[in-house]
Image (cartoon, rainbow, N blue to C red):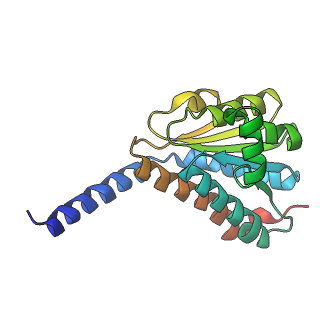
Amino acid sequence: MGMDDKISSWASRYLQAQQEVYKYIPVEKFVKIVDILHQALKEDRQIFACGNGGSASNISHFACDLCKSASDKSSRRFRVLSLNDNVAWMTAIGNDYLYEDIFVRQLENYAKAGDVLLTVSVSGNSPNVVKATEWAKAHGLQTIALVGGKKGKLAEIADNVIVINSEHYGVVEDAQMTICHMLCYVFMENPELGKVS
C-alpha cells in the first residue's frame, strides 16, 4: 500500500469516527443548554466559559460568536467571558497561587448566583476546570460540561452534561466545537429567541 493509500484510509477512518459521535449527541440535552443560555440572556446574567489547550481555543471561539454574532441578532447582548483570555491574570494566579486556581479565582471576582459556567474538557478531569465547577455549584451558578468518553469528574458534578462518546482528542474536540457553534447559531438563525423584554 502506497503512502497516498495509507493517508486516504486514515482520513476515511477519522471521518467515520467523527460521523459516529455526531449520531449520538443528545439533542434533548442540547435543547436544555439552549434554554439555560436563553434564560441567562433574558435575566442579563453573566456566562463564563473555560477549558484547557484546544478546548481553551474552542471556548474563546464560542465567546466571540455568542458575544458578537448571536448578540447582533438579539434585543439584548449576551454577556460572555472566556476565563482563558486574560493571560496576564492567569499567569499571575498560576505563579502566586496554584495553576488549578486560574479559573476559580476569576470566578471569585465576577460570578454571582444565577450566572452560568460552561466548561469544555476531553478528559473531564482537568483540575482547574473541576475546581471551577465545584466552586460554581457551591455559589449558585448553573453548570454545563461538554466532555469526552472518559467522562471524568465533570460528568459527575456538572448540572448539565453532554458526553461525546469517544476518547480520541481530535474527534471529541471537533464535536465539542460543533456544539459550541450550534449554541451560537441557534440564536443567530432563530432571532425570535433573542427577543427579550
Residue at the image point whose x is 60% and y is 49% from the top: 30
Residue at the image point whose x is 66% and y is 70% from the top: 189
Q: Is residue 98 above or below residue 168?
A: above
Which residue is farthest right?
A: 197
Which residue is farthest front?
A: 95
Residue at the image point whose x is 66% and y is 58% from the top: 60
Quadrant that contains the C terminus? bottom right
Q: Is residue 152 above or below residue 182?
A: above
Residue 182 percent coordinates (x, y): 59, 60
Residue 31, visible in the rendered structure:
yes
Residue at the image point whose x is 76% and y is 32% from the top: 97
Quadrant that contains the N terminus? bottom left
Which residue is farthest left?
A: 1
Residue 142, visible in the rendered structure:
no
**84 horizontally vs 155: left or right:** right
Residue 20 percent coordinates (x, y): 35, 51
Residue 155 percent coordinates (x, y): 57, 32
